[in-house]
Image: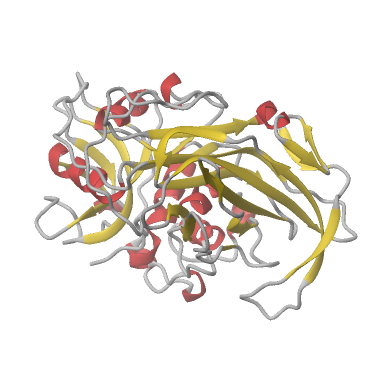
Amino acid sequence: MTLGARLPALAFAGVLTVAPLAPVGGTPALAANAGDAQVHQQRWVGDQLSVGKHRGTELRKGTLRIATPSGTEKVPDPFGKHPARSYDRARWVSPWAQTGFAATNLVPSWNAKARGKTLIRVEIRVASGSSKGSWDEVALWGFTPSGVRPHSGTSQPDDLARLATDTVLANSGRTFDRWRMRVTLLRPTGTQRTPSIASLGAVAADRTTVSKPVSRTTMKKNEQLDLPSYSQMVHAGHHPEWGGGGEAWCSPTSMAMVVAGFGRGPKASALTWEKGTDPRVDHAARHTYDHRYRGTGNWPFTTAYAGNYGLDAFVTRLRDLRDAEKIVRKGIPVVVSIKFGRGELDGAPISSTNGHLLVISGFTATGQVLVHDPAGRTNAAVRRTYDRAQFERAWLGGSGGIAYLVHPTDLPLPKRFR
Protein backbone atom coordinates (compact mmCIF):
# COMPACT_ATOMS: atom_id res chain seq x y z
CA MET A 1 0.00 0.00 0.00
CA THR A 2 1.20 3.50 -0.75
CA LEU A 3 0.24 6.19 1.72
CA GLY A 4 0.00 9.87 1.02
CA ALA A 5 3.26 11.46 2.22
CA ARG A 6 5.31 12.53 -0.75
CA LEU A 7 9.03 11.76 -0.65
CA PRO A 8 11.79 13.79 -2.34
CA ALA A 9 12.09 13.39 -6.09
CA LEU A 10 15.84 12.67 -6.05
CA ALA A 11 17.97 10.33 -3.95
CA PHE A 12 21.69 10.51 -3.20
CA ALA A 13 23.46 7.63 -1.46
CA GLY A 14 25.86 8.30 1.38
CA VAL A 15 26.51 8.40 5.09
CA LEU A 16 25.15 11.29 7.14
CA THR A 17 27.17 12.74 9.98
CA VAL A 18 25.90 16.19 10.74
CA ALA A 19 27.42 18.81 12.99
CA PRO A 20 25.10 20.70 15.36
CA LEU A 21 22.49 22.74 13.55
CA ALA A 22 22.97 26.48 13.35
CA PRO A 23 21.27 28.51 16.06
CA VAL A 24 18.24 30.50 14.99
CA GLY A 25 19.47 33.28 12.75
CA GLY A 26 23.04 32.04 13.23
CA THR A 27 25.90 30.69 11.19
CA PRO A 28 25.94 27.56 9.02
CA ALA A 29 26.61 24.13 10.46
CA LEU A 30 29.88 22.82 9.02
CA ALA A 31 31.10 19.25 8.58
CA ALA A 32 32.32 17.42 11.65
CA ASN A 33 34.83 15.58 9.45
CA ALA A 34 35.93 16.06 5.85
CA GLY A 35 33.58 14.26 3.46
CA ASP A 36 30.69 14.01 5.89
CA ALA A 37 27.22 14.84 4.64
CA GLN A 38 25.85 18.22 5.63
CA VAL A 39 22.63 19.76 6.94
CA HIS A 40 22.09 23.46 7.59
CA GLN A 41 19.04 24.99 9.29
CA GLN A 42 18.39 28.72 9.07
CA ARG A 43 15.37 30.40 10.66
CA TRP A 44 14.26 33.95 11.36
CA VAL A 45 11.90 33.99 14.32
CA GLY A 46 10.08 36.94 15.90
CA ASP A 47 12.29 40.00 16.23
CA GLN A 48 14.92 38.39 14.00
CA LEU A 49 12.62 39.31 11.12
CA SER A 50 13.82 42.90 11.54
CA VAL A 51 16.79 41.99 9.34
CA GLY A 52 16.54 41.78 5.56
CA LYS A 53 14.78 44.19 3.23
CA HIS A 54 11.35 45.57 4.11
CA ARG A 55 9.14 46.91 1.35
CA GLY A 56 5.87 47.95 2.90
CA THR A 57 6.20 45.58 5.87
CA GLU A 58 6.66 46.24 9.57
CA LEU A 59 7.53 44.15 12.58
CA ARG A 60 4.91 44.47 15.30
CA LYS A 61 4.88 42.39 18.48
CA GLY A 62 7.27 39.88 16.93
CA THR A 63 5.30 39.33 13.72
CA LEU A 64 5.80 40.61 10.19
CA ARG A 65 2.76 42.49 8.84
CA ILE A 66 1.66 44.83 6.08
CA ALA A 67 2.27 48.45 7.09
CA THR A 68 1.83 50.57 3.94
CA PRO A 69 1.36 48.44 0.82
CA SER A 70 4.15 48.85 -1.75
CA GLY A 71 1.79 48.15 -4.66
CA THR A 72 -1.10 46.08 -5.96
CA GLU A 73 -1.32 43.03 -8.20
CA LYS A 74 -3.87 40.70 -9.72
CA VAL A 75 -3.84 37.25 -8.11
CA PRO A 76 -5.50 34.47 -10.12
CA ASP A 77 -6.93 31.28 -8.67
CA PRO A 78 -5.84 28.58 -11.15
CA PHE A 79 -7.95 25.99 -9.32
CA GLY A 80 -11.21 27.87 -8.90
CA LYS A 81 -13.87 29.61 -10.91
CA HIS A 82 -13.19 33.13 -9.69
CA PRO A 83 -11.51 35.76 -11.89
CA ALA A 84 -8.19 37.23 -10.80
CA ARG A 85 -8.65 39.54 -7.83
CA SER A 86 -6.79 42.70 -6.90
CA TYR A 87 -4.52 42.45 -3.85
CA ASP A 88 -2.41 44.97 -1.96
CA ARG A 89 1.10 43.69 -1.38
CA ALA A 90 4.10 44.22 0.86
CA ARG A 91 7.35 42.24 0.80
CA TRP A 92 10.19 41.03 2.97
CA VAL A 93 13.46 39.64 1.58
CA SER A 94 15.84 37.71 3.81
CA PRO A 95 19.60 38.05 3.93
CA TRP A 96 21.55 35.38 2.06
CA ALA A 97 21.89 32.21 4.15
CA GLN A 98 25.26 30.53 3.62
CA THR A 99 25.14 26.73 3.78
CA GLY A 100 28.91 26.26 4.07
CA PHE A 101 28.77 23.31 1.65
CA ALA A 102 27.46 22.31 -1.79
CA ALA A 103 23.76 21.72 -1.15
CA THR A 104 21.45 19.76 -3.42
CA ASN A 105 18.07 20.36 -1.75
CA LEU A 106 16.19 22.74 0.50
CA VAL A 107 12.82 22.55 2.27
CA PRO A 108 11.31 25.86 3.47
CA SER A 109 8.70 26.31 6.18
CA TRP A 110 6.89 29.15 7.91
CA ASN A 111 4.55 30.03 10.77
CA ALA A 112 1.90 32.53 9.76
CA LYS A 113 -1.70 33.54 10.22
CA ALA A 114 -3.39 34.29 6.92
CA ARG A 115 -7.16 34.39 7.28
CA GLY A 116 -9.99 36.36 5.72
CA LYS A 117 -8.69 35.68 2.19
CA THR A 118 -5.25 37.09 3.00
CA LEU A 119 -2.30 35.20 1.53
CA ILE A 120 1.45 34.87 1.58
CA ARG A 121 3.64 34.00 -1.40
CA VAL A 122 6.89 32.23 -0.53
CA GLU A 123 9.80 32.27 -3.00
CA ILE A 124 13.34 30.91 -2.84
CA ARG A 125 16.43 31.95 -4.78
CA VAL A 126 19.60 29.86 -4.72
CA ALA A 127 23.13 30.72 -5.82
CA SER A 128 26.44 28.99 -6.38
CA GLY A 129 29.59 31.05 -6.58
CA SER A 130 28.92 33.86 -9.02
CA SER A 131 25.83 32.16 -10.48
CA LYS A 132 22.45 33.23 -9.11
CA GLY A 133 19.22 31.48 -9.92
CA SER A 134 15.89 33.17 -10.44
CA TRP A 135 13.21 33.55 -7.78
CA ASP A 136 11.18 30.32 -7.70
CA GLU A 137 7.69 30.36 -6.21
CA VAL A 138 7.38 27.66 -3.56
CA ALA A 139 3.80 28.35 -2.52
CA LEU A 140 0.86 30.71 -2.50
CA TRP A 141 -0.57 29.92 0.91
CA GLY A 142 -3.43 31.01 3.11
CA PHE A 143 -5.23 29.27 5.93
CA THR A 144 -8.70 29.97 4.54
CA PRO A 145 -9.41 27.86 1.43
CA SER A 146 -12.49 29.92 0.47
CA GLY A 147 -10.40 32.54 -1.34
CA VAL A 148 -7.52 31.78 -3.69
CA ARG A 149 -6.85 28.10 -3.10
CA PRO A 150 -3.49 27.36 -1.45
CA HIS A 151 -1.07 25.69 -3.85
CA SER A 152 2.59 24.93 -4.45
CA GLY A 153 4.49 26.41 -7.37
CA THR A 154 5.30 24.83 -10.70
CA SER A 155 8.62 23.05 -11.33
CA GLN A 156 10.42 26.16 -12.73
CA PRO A 157 13.52 24.19 -13.87
CA ASP A 158 15.09 27.08 -15.77
CA ASP A 159 18.45 27.57 -14.01
CA LEU A 160 20.23 26.19 -10.93
CA ALA A 161 17.27 24.50 -9.29
CA ARG A 162 13.66 23.41 -9.67
CA LEU A 163 10.71 22.80 -7.35
CA ALA A 164 9.32 19.36 -6.49
CA THR A 165 6.12 20.36 -4.65
CA ASP A 166 7.73 21.53 -1.40
CA THR A 167 11.43 20.84 -1.99
CA VAL A 168 13.85 22.99 -3.97
CA LEU A 169 16.16 20.57 -5.81
CA ALA A 170 19.39 21.44 -7.58
CA ASN A 171 19.21 20.57 -11.26
CA SER A 172 21.32 17.67 -12.53
CA GLY A 173 25.02 18.35 -12.07
CA ARG A 174 24.39 21.55 -10.10
CA THR A 175 24.60 22.51 -6.43
CA PHE A 176 24.13 25.71 -4.44
CA ASP A 177 26.00 27.23 -1.51
CA ARG A 178 23.58 29.94 -0.41
CA TRP A 179 19.93 30.84 -0.63
CA ARG A 180 17.52 33.58 0.34
CA MET A 181 13.79 33.81 0.87
CA ARG A 182 11.29 36.38 -0.38
CA VAL A 183 7.82 36.57 1.15
CA THR A 184 5.00 38.69 -0.25
CA LEU A 185 2.13 39.51 2.09
CA LEU A 186 -1.18 39.96 0.27
CA ARG A 187 -4.61 41.28 1.27
CA PRO A 188 -7.66 41.98 -0.90
CA THR A 189 -7.53 45.57 -2.11
CA GLY A 190 -9.79 47.81 -0.07
CA THR A 191 -9.46 45.77 3.12
CA GLN A 192 -7.26 46.41 6.15
CA ARG A 193 -6.73 42.86 7.40
CA THR A 194 -3.13 41.68 7.12
CA PRO A 195 -1.45 38.30 7.26
CA SER A 196 1.09 38.02 10.06
CA ILE A 197 4.27 35.96 9.97
CA ALA A 198 5.96 34.69 13.13
CA SER A 199 8.85 32.77 11.54
CA LEU A 200 10.43 31.85 8.24
CA GLY A 201 13.26 29.54 7.31
CA ALA A 202 14.49 26.45 5.53
CA VAL A 203 16.68 23.38 5.95
CA ALA A 204 19.31 22.67 3.27
CA ALA A 205 21.23 19.44 2.79
CA ASP A 206 23.55 17.75 0.33
CA ARG A 207 21.42 14.61 -0.06
CA THR A 208 17.89 13.35 0.44
CA THR A 209 18.51 9.78 1.60
CA VAL A 210 21.01 8.37 4.08
CA SER A 211 22.51 4.95 4.79
CA LYS A 212 24.38 4.42 8.06
CA PRO A 213 24.71 1.88 10.89
CA VAL A 214 21.91 1.86 13.43
CA SER A 215 22.39 4.39 16.21
CA ARG A 216 22.89 3.33 19.84
CA THR A 217 20.08 4.36 22.14
CA THR A 218 20.47 6.96 24.87
CA MET A 219 17.35 5.77 26.71
CA LYS A 220 17.48 4.47 30.29
CA LYS A 221 13.78 3.84 30.83
CA ASN A 222 10.49 3.59 28.94
CA GLU A 223 9.06 6.98 28.03
CA GLN A 224 5.94 7.72 25.95
CA LEU A 225 4.12 11.00 25.49
CA ASP A 226 0.38 11.18 26.02
CA LEU A 227 -1.21 11.94 22.64
CA PRO A 228 -4.67 11.20 21.28
CA SER A 229 -4.81 8.31 18.83
CA TYR A 230 -6.34 9.13 15.44
CA SER A 231 -6.51 6.66 12.57
CA GLN A 232 -6.43 8.07 9.06
CA MET A 233 -8.13 4.90 7.83
CA VAL A 234 -11.43 5.58 9.57
CA HIS A 235 -11.69 8.66 7.34
CA ALA A 236 -11.60 6.70 4.08
CA GLY A 237 -13.93 8.30 1.58
CA HIS A 238 -14.18 11.60 3.45
CA HIS A 239 -14.03 14.77 1.38
CA PRO A 240 -12.72 13.76 -2.06
CA GLU A 241 -12.10 17.47 -2.67
CA TRP A 242 -9.27 17.28 -0.11
CA GLY A 243 -7.79 13.93 -1.02
CA GLY A 244 -10.47 11.49 0.09
CA GLY A 245 -9.17 10.45 3.51
CA GLY A 246 -7.82 6.98 4.24
CA GLU A 247 -4.47 6.30 2.59
CA ALA A 248 -4.00 9.94 1.59
CA TRP A 249 -4.21 11.58 5.02
CA CYS A 250 -1.18 10.41 7.02
CA SER A 251 0.35 13.89 7.24
CA PRO A 252 -2.70 15.84 8.49
CA THR A 253 -3.67 12.97 10.82
CA SER A 254 -0.20 12.94 12.38
CA MET A 255 -0.29 16.71 12.81
CA ALA A 256 -3.82 16.60 14.25
CA MET A 257 -2.59 14.23 16.97
CA VAL A 258 0.35 16.48 17.85
CA VAL A 259 -1.65 19.73 17.86
CA ALA A 260 -4.41 18.19 19.99
CA GLY A 261 -1.79 16.69 22.31
CA PHE A 262 -0.63 20.21 23.14
CA GLY A 263 -4.21 21.31 23.79
CA ARG A 264 -4.30 23.48 20.66
CA GLY A 265 -6.29 23.42 17.45
CA PRO A 266 -9.69 24.48 16.19
CA LYS A 267 -12.52 25.36 18.56
CA ALA A 268 -15.60 23.17 18.58
CA SER A 269 -17.46 25.88 16.66
CA ALA A 270 -14.98 25.48 13.80
CA LEU A 271 -15.77 21.77 13.51
CA THR A 272 -19.55 21.81 13.21
CA TRP A 273 -19.41 21.25 9.44
CA GLU A 274 -17.84 17.81 10.00
CA LYS A 275 -20.15 15.25 11.62
CA GLY A 276 -17.90 12.17 11.42
CA THR A 277 -15.35 10.62 13.77
CA ASP A 278 -12.44 12.80 14.92
CA PRO A 279 -13.36 15.98 13.03
CA ARG A 280 -9.95 17.45 13.88
CA VAL A 281 -8.46 15.16 11.23
CA ASP A 282 -10.84 16.39 8.53
CA HIS A 283 -10.14 19.96 9.60
CA ALA A 284 -6.38 19.45 9.30
CA ALA A 285 -6.79 17.86 5.86
CA ARG A 286 -8.94 20.75 4.68
CA HIS A 287 -6.37 23.33 5.75
CA THR A 288 -3.24 21.50 4.53
CA TYR A 289 -4.50 20.52 1.07
CA ASP A 290 -2.25 21.64 -1.80
CA HIS A 291 -4.43 22.22 -4.84
CA ARG A 292 -1.56 21.87 -7.32
CA TYR A 293 -0.11 18.73 -5.76
CA ARG A 294 -3.69 17.52 -5.20
CA GLY A 295 -2.91 16.09 -1.82
CA THR A 296 -2.23 16.74 1.85
CA GLY A 297 1.42 15.62 1.88
CA ASN A 298 2.99 19.08 1.44
CA TRP A 299 5.49 19.33 4.32
CA PRO A 300 5.48 23.11 4.96
CA PHE A 301 1.70 23.32 4.50
CA THR A 302 1.39 20.84 7.37
CA THR A 303 3.74 22.67 9.74
CA ALA A 304 2.01 25.96 8.80
CA TYR A 305 -1.24 24.44 10.06
CA ALA A 306 0.25 24.01 13.53
CA GLY A 307 1.77 27.48 13.39
CA ASN A 308 -1.69 28.91 12.88
CA TYR A 309 -2.51 27.80 16.43
CA GLY A 310 0.42 29.54 18.08
CA LEU A 311 2.79 26.57 18.02
CA ASP A 312 6.33 26.88 16.70
CA ALA A 313 6.48 24.37 13.85
CA PHE A 314 9.03 23.78 11.12
CA VAL A 315 10.50 21.17 8.81
CA THR A 316 14.02 19.97 9.52
CA ARG A 317 16.33 16.97 9.12
CA LEU A 318 17.59 14.98 12.12
CA ARG A 319 20.68 12.78 12.15
CA ASP A 320 19.16 9.66 13.65
CA LEU A 321 16.98 8.32 16.47
CA ARG A 322 19.36 9.65 19.12
CA ASP A 323 18.28 13.14 18.08
CA ALA A 324 14.64 12.12 18.32
CA GLU A 325 15.26 10.69 21.81
CA LYS A 326 16.60 14.02 23.06
CA ILE A 327 13.51 15.83 21.75
CA VAL A 328 10.99 13.32 23.07
CA ARG A 329 12.57 13.48 26.55
CA LYS A 330 11.74 17.21 26.51
CA GLY A 331 8.06 16.31 26.05
CA ILE A 332 7.95 17.05 22.32
CA PRO A 333 6.81 14.40 19.79
CA VAL A 334 8.55 14.11 16.41
CA VAL A 335 6.68 13.57 13.14
CA VAL A 336 8.83 11.75 10.58
CA SER A 337 8.58 10.57 6.98
CA ILE A 338 9.42 6.92 6.30
CA LYS A 339 9.59 4.53 3.36
CA PHE A 340 9.84 0.73 3.46
CA GLY A 341 9.28 -2.36 1.37
CA ARG A 342 7.53 -5.64 2.11
CA GLY A 343 8.95 -7.29 5.23
CA GLU A 344 11.11 -4.27 6.15
CA LEU A 345 9.10 -2.96 9.15
CA ASP A 346 7.75 -5.69 11.38
CA GLY A 347 4.38 -5.00 12.98
CA ALA A 348 3.41 -2.19 10.61
CA PRO A 349 -0.30 -2.04 9.72
CA ILE A 350 0.64 -1.74 6.03
CA SER A 351 2.88 -4.03 4.02
CA SER A 352 4.92 -1.31 2.30
CA THR A 353 4.90 2.38 1.44
CA ASN A 354 6.86 4.78 -0.72
CA GLY A 355 6.01 7.61 1.64
CA HIS A 356 4.25 7.71 5.01
CA LEU A 357 4.21 10.10 7.99
CA LEU A 358 3.76 9.06 11.61
CA VAL A 359 4.53 10.35 15.09
CA ILE A 360 7.44 9.17 17.25
CA SER A 361 5.83 9.46 20.67
CA GLY A 362 8.35 7.60 22.81
CA PHE A 363 11.01 4.93 23.24
CA THR A 364 11.50 1.84 25.33
CA ALA A 365 14.44 1.51 27.70
CA THR A 366 16.20 -0.59 25.05
CA GLY A 367 15.66 2.00 22.30
CA GLN A 368 12.73 0.46 20.43
CA VAL A 369 10.51 3.09 18.84
CA LEU A 370 7.05 3.86 20.24
CA VAL A 371 4.82 5.50 17.67
CA HIS A 372 1.37 6.83 16.96
CA ASP A 373 1.02 5.39 13.45
CA PRO A 374 -2.11 6.80 11.75
CA ALA A 375 -2.14 3.86 9.34
CA GLY A 376 -3.64 1.72 12.11
CA ARG A 377 -7.07 0.50 10.98
CA THR A 378 -8.78 1.88 14.08
CA ASN A 379 -7.89 4.44 16.71
CA ALA A 380 -7.09 1.58 19.08
CA ALA A 381 -4.52 0.23 16.57
CA VAL A 382 -2.56 3.49 16.24
CA ARG A 383 -0.09 2.93 19.12
CA ARG A 384 2.68 0.56 18.02
CA THR A 385 6.25 -0.46 18.77
CA TYR A 386 8.81 -0.76 15.97
CA ASP A 387 12.26 -2.29 15.82
CA ARG A 388 14.90 0.44 16.11
CA ALA A 389 17.14 -0.72 13.24
CA GLN A 390 14.25 -1.31 10.83
CA PHE A 391 12.61 2.00 11.68
CA GLU A 392 15.78 4.06 11.40
CA ARG A 393 16.53 2.57 7.97
CA ALA A 394 12.99 3.34 6.84
CA TRP A 395 13.33 6.96 8.01
CA LEU A 396 16.88 7.88 7.01
CA GLY A 397 16.79 5.77 3.85
CA GLY A 398 13.35 7.02 2.93
CA SER A 399 13.54 10.78 3.51
CA GLY A 400 17.02 11.53 4.82
CA GLY A 401 15.75 12.23 8.32
CA ILE A 402 12.91 14.63 7.46
CA ALA A 403 10.96 15.64 10.57
CA TYR A 404 8.31 18.08 11.69
CA LEU A 405 9.24 19.70 15.01
CA VAL A 406 6.23 21.23 16.74
CA HIS A 407 6.11 22.71 20.25
CA PRO A 408 4.62 25.52 22.32
CA THR A 409 6.96 28.48 22.70
CA ASP A 410 7.07 27.96 26.48
CA LEU A 411 8.29 24.37 25.98
CA PRO A 412 11.60 24.91 24.17
CA LEU A 413 13.41 22.36 22.06
CA PRO A 414 16.85 21.20 23.16
CA LYS A 415 19.24 24.02 22.26
CA ARG A 416 20.85 22.24 19.32
CA PHE A 417 17.54 21.96 17.45
CA ARG A 418 16.15 25.48 17.86
Counting every numbered tag in the picture gives 0
Q: Quadrant of residue 14?
A: top left
- Do we see residue 378 in this rendering? no
Residue 344 spot, x, y in % from top left: 12, 52
Residue 7 placement, left or right of 274: left
Seen from the viewer's position, the closer of residues 81 and 276 is 81
Task: Name the residue at 55% across, 49% down.
Answer: 305
Residue 158, image x, y percentages = 52, 63
Q: In the visual, does 89 lie left or right of 9? A: right
Image quarter (top left, top right, bottom left or bottom right) of the N terminus? bottom left
Residue at the extreme left of the image, as rendered: 343
Can you say whether 416 is above or below 263 in the image? above
Percent of width and height locating residue 355: 30, 58
- Which residue is painted at 68% across and 32% down in the image? 49
Residue 234: quadrant of the picture: bottom left
Left or right: where 234 falls relative to 196: left
The residue nearer to you, when weighing 173 against 21, is 173
Residue 393 in view of the camera: yes
The furthest residue to the bottom: 81
Residue appearing at x 71%, y 54% in the figure? 115
Q: Between residues 164 and 37, which one lies in front from this camera angle? A: 37
Q: On screen, 135 above or below 234?
A: above
Colour mode of the rendering: secondary structure
